Image (cartoon, helix red, strand yellow):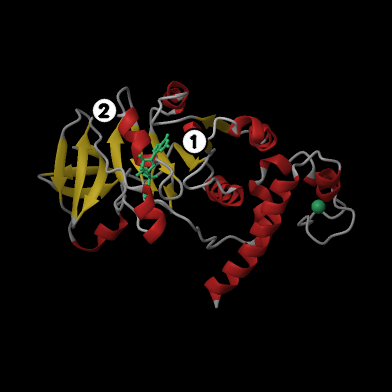
Amino acid sequence: MKGIVTEAVGGFFYVVDDEGQKHRCEVRGRVQEQIFPGDRVVFENWMIEEIIPRDNLLHRPKVANVDAVNIMFSIKEPEIDFSLLDRFILLVEKEGLNPVILINKLDLDSDFPAKQEDKITAYKNAGYSVHIFSVSKGTNLQVVKESLFAGINVMAGPSGVGKSALINELVSGAELTVGDISEKLGRGTHTTRQVKLVPLPGNGWVADSPGFTSLTLENLKPEEVKNYFPDFSGYQNKCHFSTCTHTHEPDCFVKESVENNEIPEFRYNSYCQLVEAARKEGDDHYS
Ligand SMILES: Nc1nc2c(ncn2[C@@H]2O[C@H](COP(=O)(O)OP(=O)(O)OP(=O)(O)O)[C@@H](O)[C@H]2O)c(=O)[nH]1
Ligand SMILES: [Zn+2]
């Protein structure tokens, strides 16, 4: 039989077959560490026998065969950090996926869309969908529902932004634990520990994942960062040097375009920070 792994718990794997039946399966030996939620597997008598080759594997959180990543932040409690958002975007781009940006808790500041219009427009111009909504008030949730794919959707983002609350709202009966925000911000603990695929009402799955406040750039070379900024793409082939990293080189058309306000300055600043971080974290990684 074939199925999809939805959850790994204490050495067991929950596998849902094509009919929607759930099976608690085991695995022999060392293969265990290499099976993740989202993996399609062949199983027999509650024993996983084979992993079907993956389309991709997201590293943080570890989910296989991902179709879409939703990067979720909140307007307040915790306040959105755009440079952290840009870091998330980079990591998703690096996996060859197109992120969707979700911004929750509109009820805490209804002026946010107007105040941050420049930034929101910048993300839209870079090719990303941005949805601003409130889970607790139910505002704009329909468009979030419609943006989910029929395949595997991942919710990523810092702790406390409302990922579990959103999934509970989208999927009746998901019953994920929604945490107390003051406890979370105070102690830095995460309510969500295990990645779990939850079936969506129509078709597809959504993965709730632990919140992250920092993300490492392992295996990312500084000179690669520019490939993951689609907002630079119309500009960077016009730099004097084809190897231009748009940081210190003369005759850099990207830097010129930042000065002319064609490329948003905050995105360029994030880019420079990420190049620097890739240099530093790459060194740490190899030392
Ligand atoms: N004001 C407001 N609070 C919200 C909204 N959505 C969720 N919350 C609250 O935010 C807190 C955190 O929600 P969770 O769903 O646990 O957050 P999470 O992103 O899943 O957090 P982790 O599991 O730690 O990654 C809870 O107290 C929710 O009730 C919203 O739209 N507005
Ligand atoms: Zn340049």
Residue 189 to residue 287: above or below: above
Q: Give left or right: position of 177 versus 102.
A: left
Pinpoint residue 124: horizontal percent, then vertical percent. 64, 32
Closer to the eye: label 1 or 2: 1
**Where's ligand 1: which quadrant?**
top left
Q: Amino acid at mark 2?
A: Ser
Q: Residue at x 20, y 30 (%)?
A: 20
224 or 138, nearer to the observer: 138
228 or 170, nearer to the observer: 170
The residue at label 1 has a CB less than 8 Å from ligand 1: yes
Q: Residue at x 67, y 41 (%)?
A: 230
Residue at which label 2 appears: 172
Pinpoint residue 43: horizontal percent, then vertical percent. 18, 44
- Let me know if residue 24 appears in the view: yes
- Let me know if residue 62 appears in the view: no
Label 1 or label 2, whichever comes before in sequence order:
1
Residue 198 to residue 209: above or below: above
Residue 102 to residue 282: above or below: above
